Amino acid sequence: MFLDLHCHSVVSDDARATVEQYAKWIAGLRRKGYRVDGIVLTEHRTFDQTSDYRALEDAYDLAIFKASELDTDTGHFLVYGVNAELLRRFDFRDVRIDAVELVRACEETGAIALPAHPGRERVSFIDLAGTRDFTLVRAIEVLNGGSRDWENARARALAQARGYVGIAGSDAHFVNAIARYLTRFEQPVRTMDDLVAAIRAGRVTVATLEETRVAA
C-alpha cells in the first residue's frame, strides 16, 4: 500500500483543502496511472475525534486515517495512534510540549511519535534536539513535500546515521500538493494499529508519486 502519512485538511487552521477535495484529486491521479491507496490527516495541534470519513472511503476506495501533528520544544512531531491516555496527559494545543515525554508516553500507550520534517533549518529536530535523550525515537520523516531538497537530504542522512525508520508525506495544505511523497507499506494497512506496528517494525519504505507508476 502507498499512503501519504502527512497532510492537513481544513480542520487545521492553516490548510485550505477538504478531505473530499483530496479524494477527488487522488481519483484523478489514479486515472493517470498513479497509485495512492490512502492518506493520514495529521491535523495541527489537535486530534479530530468527530469527523467521519467512512462514506468517502467507500466512495473513492481510499483509506483515510486520523493522526496529529503537535508542536513541541524540539520541533513538530507526528503522532500516530492517538488514544485517550495521550489526550488526557497532553494539551494538544500547547506549542511547547515536552518532546521527550511525548515520545515516551507514546511508547507506553502503543502509539508512536516521530519528528516531522526534521531537517528544516533552526526550527526542527536536527537543530533543536541537542543532547536530550531521544533514544526512544524509532522513526523520522525523511521526505516531506513542504521541505526543500537539502532539508530532506539532511533528514535522510540522519536516518541513515542513526538507523531510524524513514517515512514520507506530502505535508499538503492545498489540494494539488497531496501525495507528492508516499510511504510504501509491505502489508495491507487496515487500522491505525496496523500502521503503527509497520513503522515500529521498519516494514516501510519511501517513494515519490512518480515511482508508484512503476510499482502499480
Image (spheres, rainbow, N blue to C red):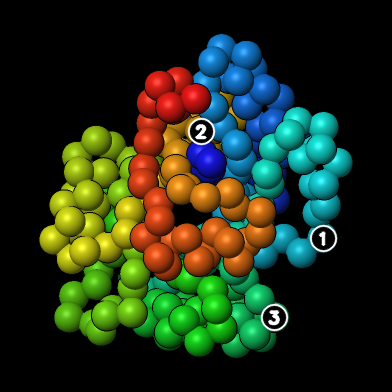
At 38% from the left edge and 31% from the top edge, which residue is drawn? 208
- Image position, residue 179 (x, y; %): 51, 33
At 54% from the left edge and 74% from the top edge, which residue is drawn? 111
Residue carrying label 1: 50
Relative height, residue 78 to residue 20 (above, below): below
At 45% from the left edge and 20% from the top edge, which residue is drawn? 213
| Crowd around label 2: few <14 · some 14–19 · many ≥20 (10 Å) | many
Whole-angstrom CA distance, mark 1 to mark 3, is: 14 Å
| Crowd around label 3: few <14 · some 14–19 · many ≥20 (10 Å) | few
Q: Which of marks 3 and 2 is nearer the N terminus?
A: 3
Residue carrying label 2: 179
Check disc 1 and give the amino acid type: Thr
Task: Please tell me whether mark 1 sits on a helix, a strand or a loop.
Answer: loop
Whole-angstrom CA distance, mark 3 to mark 2, is: 29 Å
| Crowd around label 1: few <14 · some 14–19 · many ≥20 (10 Å) | few
- Image position, residue 171 (x, y; %): 48, 43
**Which numbered tag is attached to residue 84?**
3
Q: Which residue occupies the foreground of this view, 180 or 2?
A: 2
Q: How many labels does the image show?
A: 3
- Visible residue check, residue 150: yes
Q: Earlier in the sequence, mark 1 or mark 2?
A: 1
Check disc 3 and give the amino acid type: Ala
- Image position, residue 117 (x, y; %): 35, 52
- Image position, residue 113 (x, y; %): 45, 69
Check disc 2 and give the amino acid type: Ala
**Which numbered tag is attached to residue 67?**
none
Task: Please tell me whether mark 3 sits on a helix, a strand or a loop.
Answer: helix
Relative height, residue 5 to residue 132 (above, below): above
